Image: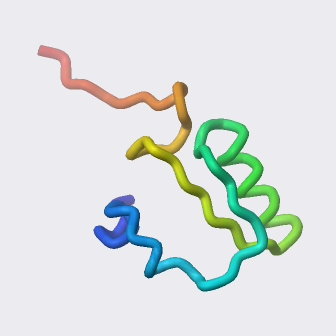
Amino acid sequence: MTLPEDILSGDLLSCPEEFDLLIVGAGLSGAVLAERCSKILGMTCLVIDKRGHLGGNCYDYVTTQG
């Protein structure tokens, strides 16, 4: 899934004006906290991270075998 450019650019104009929870860091803890709070508690969450991917240090990718 590719995120829209306005989200990838970090422009906060696309987010709601109000949200219930601000989560700084989209590593394992931040991602799980956001998912659980939104699914179980019905909260709206804004997750910000300096990296361009979710999962923190657990991020991985597929490479082609040469």
Relative vertical location of residue 65 with respect to residue 21 in this rendering, above or below: above
Q: Which residue shows up at 54% across the image and 27% down it? A: 58
Relative vertical location of residue 25 with respect to residue 20 in this rendering, above or below: above
Q: Is residue 26 left or right of residue 61?
A: right
Nearer to me, 1 or 18: 18
Q: Which residue shows up at 60% across the image and 58% down it? A: 47
Q: Which residue shows up at 76% across the image and 50% down it? A: 33
- Quarter of the image for residue 38 reads bottom right
Q: Is residue 52 left or right of residue 42?
A: left
Q: The N terminus is located in which quarter?
A: bottom left
What colouring style does the render use?
rainbow
Could you tell me residue 17's position as x and y percent?
61, 85
Q: Which residue shows up at 55% across the image and 37% down it? A: 55
Residue with the most extreme left position: 66
- Quarter of the image for residue 22 reads bottom right
Could you tell me residue 34's position as x and y percent?
71, 56
Q: Is residue 27 left or right of residue 7?
A: right
Q: The C terminus is located in which quarter?
A: top left
- Quarter of the image for residue 26 reads top right
Residue with the most extreme top position: 66
Q: Is residue 21 left or right of residue 13?
A: right
Nearer to me, 2 or 45: 45
